[in-house]
Amino acid sequence: MKIAVLFSGGKDSTFTLSYYLQQGWDVKCLITLLPSTNYSWMFQTSSKRIIEMQAEALGIPVILQKTKGEKEKELKDLEKAIKKAKEKYSIEGVAVGALASDYQQERINRICHKLGLKCFNPLWHKDQAKLLEEIIVSGFEVRLVKVAAEGLNKDWLGKILTLEDLERLKKLNKKIGLHVGGEGGEFESIVFDGPIFKKKIEILESEKKMENDFCGELIIKKLKANDKV
């Protein structure tokens, strides 16, 4: 089946992409919405530069669609992007890396139905801790680029998540109810390498910008995609 993957650049959408590539499905393109603000009801706020470099490293074309990130209005922008993918690549469905957001799943399903496409949610309601463990063990280089929760300080920004970090996230879940997968907005991630990447992305220059002790982001200033041996 020919599909597009709704791609944020983070761990869940990347793992969704990996799942369908491993199943032998024909992933024709990635679809990314780029909010013009730091807040969106549905989409992670990755930069255009990072997404384009990930697409290059993955060897898959990407459809980029700007959106103001306003509730409901951004759904029209998503519909435009999916429609472009259908017209350009003749896709038959869209895969989404949603974990637990009914808001997100219902609205994407509705758009796909309207456009005569199937919607796939392979990670839906999976145990977040087990999923993150699987992502790490599979060899994906996941780095946190935003944090916004007690216990996630400056030291978490830019680091590659390990199984030890997963245990720390589990403890924070028991202590304060933090979502291990970041579903509550506690963090955002970017994947820089993994088994499906044809090139490895390297951060050449970055800066950690904190609003307070537990809220901040990694400002990535310079990147490079290196060929893998």
Image (cartoon, rainbow, N blue to C red):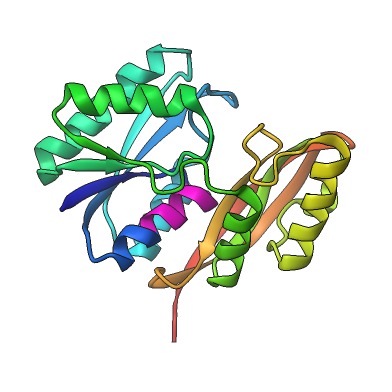
**Horizontal arrangement in the rendering, residue 136 relative to residue 18 (left or right):** right
Residue farthest along the bottom direction in this orientation: 229
Residue 179 appears at what percent x and percent y? 70, 40
**Horizontal arrangement in the rendering, residue 115 relative to residue 204 (left or right):** left
Residue 46 appears at what percent x and percent y? 52, 40
- Is residue 87 shown above or below 200? above
Viewport quadrant of the C terminus: bottom left
- Residue 53 visible within the image: no
The image quarter containing residue 39 is top right
**Horizontal arrangement in the rendering, residue 184 relative to residue 140 (left or right):** right
Residue 40 appears at what percent x and percent y? 53, 23
Q: For the point 44% across and 80% down, which residue is it?
A: 228
- Is residue 5 shown above or below 102? below
Q: For the point 26% across and 53% down, which residue is it?
A: 61
**Horizontal arrangement in the rendering, residue 126 relative to residue 14 (left or right):** right
Magenta region, main secondary structure? helix
Question: What is the count of numbered marks?
Answer: 0
Residue 20 on the magenta segment = no
Residue 2 appears at what percent x and percent y? 16, 51
